[in-house]
Amino acid sequence: MRVWIVFLLCLAGHAMAAPAEEEPALEELVTEEPAEEVEVGANPVQVEVGEFDEAIEVVEDAAENPCLNHRCKKGKVCEVDDTNTPMCVCQDPSSCPAAEGEFEHICGNDNKTYDSSCHFFATKCALEGTKKGHKLHLDYIGSCKLIEPCLDNELTEFPLRMRDWLKNVLVTLYARDEDNNLLTEKQKLRVKKIYENEKRLEAGDHSLDLLARDFQKNYNMYIFPVHWQFGQLDQHPADGYLTHSELAPLRAPLIPMEHCTTRFFEECDADKDKYIALEEWAACFGIKEQDVDKDLVI
Ligand SMILES: *[C@@H]1O[C@H](CO)[C@@H](O)[C@H](O)[C@H]1NC(C)=O
Ligand SMILES: [Ca+2]
Ligand SMILES: [Ca+2]
């Protein structure tokens, strides 16, 4: 998640700030499925149990409130039935906390603006089992707006810039990694080679021409960043394929700033099976087939 914050800062054209632990988890905000990451709906007992309460009270509370340790996926909250058995039920959107601002708004792929991701997932839950509910996805962060169509020539620019960002994000993570452990040891070894390469194009506002030439010349430096990005997204489950919701942490913040995002990822799914395989992913970033290597997704 810290990775995405850095990534966003690059995209927004700001100087990269130190990754902040206390930032809201973007990935958590936009990833739709994994139930285990989702917090239990706030309940008064949980809120009142503070560090200063005696342990015995906590145990009693847990026994009395089976919802305390019962996790529900996004859009659902825990309730107990007549037999005091916890179950997850759809959250009423009106019980969602009021959005604190425009930045919490979410645009659905129905081109409707939802006040917050809570409102969005509660609405999606209410439609569970219907065709409409199945089709409803979080499209991007922010209120719905007019997104200009992506022209063919703009589409070809997209991977040029994205590859460059990825490389710079990795190098920046590496440079700051000493105390943060943002990368694993294996990843560090890979990035070290890029970081220490004198021919590396430094981060900057480069022309598309230069980016294209650098990709030709320093092609090898781009192979790992493209694989790494895939590995960051392919986690629910890590099976070598990206689903729509696995892609969401990348897509959702990007779309309002980069109008070719949707078309790019649509076309990335070359066989149109709704999954982006590692091979498809690598190909749409210009990585040659013989350089696609599952072992690089580490
Ligand atoms: C989506 O909604 C926005 C804002 O209401 C509007 O400007 C835009 O034209 C809509 N897009 C589509 C594809 O209907
Ligand atoms: Ca996957
Ligand atoms: Ca595919």
Image (tube, helix red, strand yellow):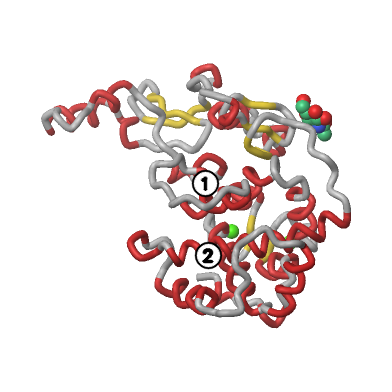
Whether 226 is drawn above or below 2: the answer is below
Whether 130 is drawn above or below 272: the answer is above
Query: Where is residue 179 shown, x and y percent of the image?
Result: 33, 61
Which residue lies most toward the top here? 94
Residue that carries the numbered disc 1 in the rendered image: 27
Tell me what residue is drawn at x 76 percent, y 45 percent.
Answer: 259
* Type of amino acid at the residue the image marks with label 1: Glu
Tell me what residue is drawn at x 23 percent, y 30 percent.
Answer: 63
Judge the density around disc 2: few (<14), some (14-19), many (≥20) Cα neighbours within 10 Å: many
Question: In the rendered image, which quarter is residue 217 located in?
Answer: bottom right
Q: Residue 170's mark?
A: 2
Q: Residue 134's mark?
A: none
Which residue lies most toward the bottom here? 290
Q: Is mark 1 on a helix, strand or loop?
A: helix
Going by the image, does 107 lie left or right of 231? right
Query: Where is residue 23 shown, x and y percent of the image?
Result: 44, 41
Note whether residue 239 is visible.
no
Q: State the residue in front, 8 or 81.
A: 8
Going by the image, does 49 lie left or right of 76? left
Tell me what residue is drawn at x 44 percent, y 66 percent.
Answer: 175
